[in-house]
Image (cartoon, rainbow, N blue to C red):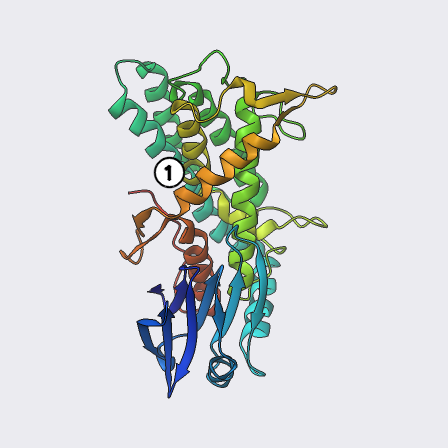
Amino acid sequence: MRKLLNTLYITNPNAYLSKDGENIVVKVDEEETVRRPIHILESIICFNYNGMSPALMKLCADHGVTVSFVNQFGTFLGRVQGEVNGNVLLRRTQYRIADNADKSLEISRNFIIGKVVNGRKIINRALRDHSAVVNNELLLEVQDKMLNSIDKIKNSSTADELRGIEGEIAKTYFQGINELVLQQKESFFFIERSRRPPRDNLNALMSYAYTLLTHEMESALETVGLDPYVGFFHTDRPGRVSLALDMIEELRAYMADRFVISLINMKQISAEDFVIKENGGILMKDETRKIFLSAWQKRKQEIVEHPFSHEKIEFGLIPYVQACLMARFIRGDLEEYPPFFVS
């Protein structure tokens, strides 16, 4: 259990929530572990929860505290809220910003700056920890090109221009991705980004990680009342969760790419874990997906320090904290949206 940005996150699967006066009480195995006054909270998010009393649900509804339920894999299940809440106003404001090209561009620049900063951090970590076995010249060149792109991002004047810059950033970053693979290089290598279907083992793993991350960001946005389908950087398209795709840009390198590279380097996944389809696409075997998901769930439980709040949180809560920050920005509580920067 953790309180962050006025949101109480219930991550213990054995937790039961009840009401005591004007307080929320969390018990695990009949023992009280957390007590919070209702007036200091604006929302509760329960992951794989054990239960909640109807009396507490009414208390939350009466005080405008939204309760969201998400399963252990990050799938949004539903939300309990009172008759009067700010979600309609929040979404109306979101839609107005999305229709304003200048405001959308301002937010989008922050997404892409976060992408650059975090991508460079991943490259820098390889240079720092494995300088004896990686191509230092190549990685330093990648770092420099990414650093030089920040001024271009800040000076971009249209969404199309920013998208062009982002495309070049991604291309530059992926030029160095092979150097991060230290083991099984003959089976895991990167020629170019491919998807639908992925054309090699590394792309297959990355696509799966991006899908999971997008799914969890979509759920996070739902819990704070934002519309995951209306974004600021990715264009609207039926069935596309544009805002979720926007917000994972800054998280791809840290939460997905680094995780995939770790699976390969630690030999948790090997070349035998994939099948080649008739169309040339590469897919993970069913057992491989189970290994991947097990490792993904384990990674989500690790503790990191959030760079904006400086609180210790579970790794898997990063999308939820960023969604809260986006909602606060849209409501006018923050002057700008703060991207997640890897420390």
Q: Look at the picture and state if 59 lies above or below 94.
A: below
Which corner quadrant of the image does residue 263 belong to? top left
Looking at the image, which residue sits at the far front? 29
Which residue occupies the extreme bottom position in the image? 21
Please name whichever residue, 320 or 172, is drawn nearer the observer in this view of the structure: 320
Image spot of residue 227 (x, y percent): 60, 61
**Is residue 262 toward the left or the right of residue 241 in the image?**
left
Task: Say which residue appears at 54% left-offset and 54% top-offset.
Answer: 104
Instruction: Place residue 230 in its image quadrant.
Output: bottom right
Crowding near pointer 1: few (<14 within 10 Å), some, many (20+)? many
Q: Is residue 21 above or below residue 154?
A: below
The three-letter code of the residue at mark 1 reads Asn
Please tell me which residue lies in front, 80 or 54.
54
Task: Please tell me whether mark 1 sits on a helix, a strand or a loop.
Answer: helix
Locate the C terminus by quadrant. top left
Visible residue check, residue 156: yes
Indicate the quadrant containing the N terminus: top left, top right, bottom left or bottom right: bottom left
Residue 110: give x, y in percent of width and height.
43, 48
Could you tell me if residue 154 is visible in this image? no
User: Residue 337: x, y in percent?
Assistant: 42, 56
Quick check: 279 left or right of 273?
A: right
Up-down: is 154 above or below 276? Answer: below
* 168 and 183: which is toward the camera: 183
Q: Position of residue 141 (x, y in %)?
A: 36, 20
Residue located at (40% from left, 38% from top): 254
Which residue is farthest top? 186
Is 298 rendered above or below residue 39?
above
Total labels drawn:
1
Circle 1 sits on which residue? 118
